[in-house]
Image (tube, coloured by chain):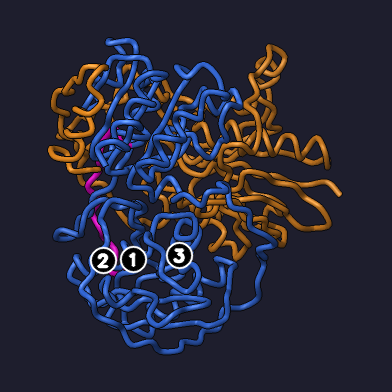
Amino acid sequence: MNCLAFVPTKNGQATKAGLEALSYAKRCGATVTALMIGELNGDGGAGAAGASKVLHIEEHIQDEGQIARAVAAAADSEGATLVVAPHDHRGRAVAPRVAVRMGAGMVPGVTGVIEGSEVKKNVFSGKAMAHIQLSAGKNVLTTTPNAFGVDSDGSIAAVEAFAADVGEARLVVKGYEASSEDGSIPLPEASRVVSAGRGLKGPEHWGIVEELAQTIQATMACSRPVSDMGWRPHHEHVGQTGITIRPDLYIAAGISGAIQHLAGVNQSKVIVAINTDPEAPLFKAADYGIVGDAFEVLPQLTEAIKTMG
Amino acid sequence: MTMKFLVCISKAPDTTSRIAFTEGDTKFDSNGVQFIVNPYDEWYALVRALELKEQHGGTVTTVTVGEADCDPVIRKALAIGADDAVRIDAQPQDALHVASLIANHAKDAGYDVILCGKETIDHNGSVVGGMVAEMLDLAYISLAITLDLEGGKAHAKREASGGLETVEATMPVVVSAAKGMAEQRIPNMRGIMAARTKPLNVEAPEGGTLGTTVSRFEMPPAKGDCKMVSADQPEELIRLLREEAKVL
């Protein structure tokens, strides 16, 4: 089976979500060609993660309608019956268009490799999983960030220039502003997340959350009431109607754990709950718990990590 | 210049619903489940369309793929302020199926802006908007958190890895709405009364291709017990995270 993977880049390197898509395709048993667009250093790390070859378009095209044309053309030239892209902001805009162009079936946000002709994805915001039958001859899948990890075998892929008729741009990117000044890893890709809720009583108390997050190189998050009240920005809201995350470690302080919050975080590998209320529902979903006041426990944890080295 | 807005509305189980399956785990068990307008469709896509209509003039039509059991949530959308509604009378199968039915409805209808929520909270696909855009050969702004129309162009900020992109797209345009685009509107009594007599046009499905099928659902494995650590032993928690869980 030949696979074409759309691998987004940043500063000449494949993004982590893009490398995960490559590793995923390789693990599905496919021979994988990566399509990479814009500035690229060497193979951008694609070879080590599973690509046998990189097709490179030097022009930095940004309209996902044009990117989709390029992906479909590359899939066609490689005889690919499978197209894989990350389920990040870029893949979400590109992949559905590719599926339509190719007359392919599409499964967004897969969480398991293809077994037989079935693939698994989360549904109901992580409260259940669905096994999806791939019934079309060609298929487009997007991979859930942090669900697979990145393989690395040290190899380097050959890079070939690729040209495709992508038509006119109808969408132009005019600017970009980073949401965090500290350059922390975006929530969907973060492997560690420290999150806090109403239990912190006000935005002025977030310093203790930030200190713990910095100490363990984690990204910060919050519950819905906290973002609704304007204590923290919307892009930090994790939960059913916010961002769904699946880090290795999720530490939640002062969050009771309503079902909508759990839906966004229950795919985390390890959950730590800190709450004054021993009956808080989050303890039922957590792996480790401390019944205690976040104002005391968070600084103590930060201190303990610093002294333990 | 007045604008024609189309807002894609989907029926979804209420966010507090207990999720269960029947018929050998092949069907969602809707027994006792309260259905709502998918939050992203209602709170952001629909409300922003209404705000833009108030600003520019025009009409807001909603479109839903579904059977008659969708009518209550469609009436809710009308009560919030949509002018009229279209229901394409078919049980939705997968994203490709839904998108092709919506695209068939929209293709000659002259909509300037087609809005949908960024995803539904049941299938979490995030796919229909992009497919509709491709089928109609239109620009697509995905995961937009702001949307304004000026000079025949759509201007938006959208979520991008670790930040926000400012984009400009040629109209007509398809936009998927993420959190922040608008504030939820609670329908008032006048809206609810008016919704009863607003047009809800049922159209027969035309076309509709299928790309995938759900073979079965599965519940996630039950979580083990939570290991409690005393509040005065933070070192013990760090040790467990390092040595037992191996995540630090």
Determine the residue positioned at 14% across, 40% down.
B243
Q: From the rendered image, report the letter of the chain displayed in blue.
A: A
Q: Which mark is residue A100?
A: 3
Q: For marks 1 and 3, give the CA distance.
A: 24 Å
Q: What's under tag 3, amino acid-wise?
A: Val
Write down the chain letter for disc 2. A
Distance CA(mark 3)–CA(mark 2)? 24 Å
**Distance of mark 2 from mark 1, alpha carbons?**
6 Å
Point out residue B133 in the picture as x, y percentages from the top left corner. 57, 59
Q: Nearer the viewer, mark 3 or mark 2?
A: 2
Chain B tint in image: orange
Chain under numbered label 1: A
Q: Amino acid at mark 1?
A: Leu
Q: Is residue B17 left or right of residue B159?
A: left
Q: Which residue is mark 1?
A: A19
Q: Are marks 2 and 1 in contact (CB under 8 Å)?
A: yes
Tell me where the magenta segment starts and ends, as one range. A126-139
Q: In terms of sequence position, does the residue under pointer 1 or pointer 3 come before the other? A: 1
Q: Secondary structure at mark 2?
A: helix
x and y percentages locating residue A286 in the rendered image:
24, 26
